[in-house]
Amino acid sequence: MTISCKDLAKVYEGGKEGWPALRGVTFDIKPGEFVAVTGPSGCGKSTLLNILGLLDEPSGGSYRLRGRDTGAMSDAERSLARRDGIGFVFQSFHLLNRLTAAENVGLPLLYAGVEREPMRERAHGLLGRVGLQGKERKTPLELSGGERQRVAIARALANSPEIILADEPTGNLDSASSREILDILFGLNAEGITVVMVTHDRELAARAGRNLRMRDGRLEA
């Protein structure tokens, strides 16, 4: 799934002229790349990731996904493209504490209308894939931070996405857990999944195949 952004701009309301979060950002990402987006806090990294994930819309410029201009998509088409092609991994996991690990992983399948037994089998299989065999019935409160992030990755894989967008996926983890999560992401990338990861950590970013460094809403390199 090719990503192509040209002169992307995003201005949030506030004050006389608003606050520009993105200022003319242009780049392409080819299928199967592992791209790290780096830069200081407030430089526009998360805003960019939200636009790539169709969670937000640019104020200017264009974003093409699979060759299609996302600005021309209806809300329903954006939702379908997001559900069927993009997996999300967040710093704070975004898991539901009242549900088990398997139930959290199965949520995207539930929303997609998958029946209960295939959904359960898929969720258990994905948890096994990220090394959580035997913990399917644990709730997030019974898991470590690294294990919670593994559940989040398994959930991101539920609908077999072509792209994973990871926003500071190791930000709340210790060094050992961070390495484990990165190993999983690089393993998925080796299978052909495109990964775009926002991170403050230059050492982690150095492992990526390509870096996009941002400052003040612009792309430096």
Image (cartoon, helix red, strand yellow):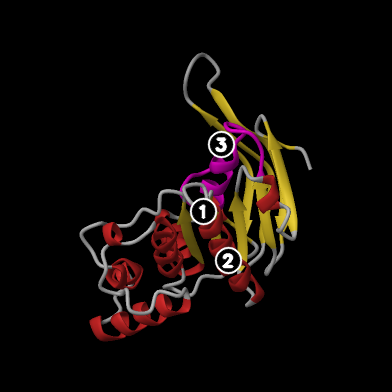
Q: Is residue 148 left or right of residue 170?
A: left
Residue wearing tag 1: 169
* Residue 39 picture location, percent across and down: 66, 38
- Against 40, residue 37 (above or below) is below
Q: Amino acid at mark 3?
A: Ser
- Against 216, residue 128 (above or below) is below
Q: Amino acid at mark 2?
A: Leu
Q: Residue at x 41, y 56 (%)?
A: 145
Residue wearing tag 2: 185
Q: Nearer the viewer, residue 21 or 215?
A: 215
Return the disc, 3 or 2, that comes first in the chain's sequence. 3
Q: Which residues are magenta?
A: 38-59
Q: Is residue 144 magenta?
A: no
Q: Quadrant of residue 24?
A: top right
Asked whether residue 197 is in view, the answer is yes
Picture quarter with the N terminus: bottom right
Tag 2 near tag 1, CB within 8 Å: yes
- Residue at mark 3 to residue at mark 2: CA–CA distance: 31 Å
Residue situated furthest top in the rendering: 16
Q: Residues within 10 Å of mark 2 (few under 14, many from 20)?
A: many
- Residue at mark 1 to residue at mark 3: CA–CA distance: 27 Å
Return the disc, 2 or 1, that comes first in the chain's sequence. 1
Mark in front: 3 vs 2: 2
Element type at mark 3: loop
Q: Residue at x 79, y 43 (%)?
A: 221
Residue wearing tag 3: 59
Q: Amino acid at mark 1?
A: Pro
Element type at mark 2: helix
* Residue 123 picture location, percent across and down: 35, 77
Q: Residue at x 40, y 75 (%)?
A: 127
Q: Is residue 36 left or right of residue 89?
A: right
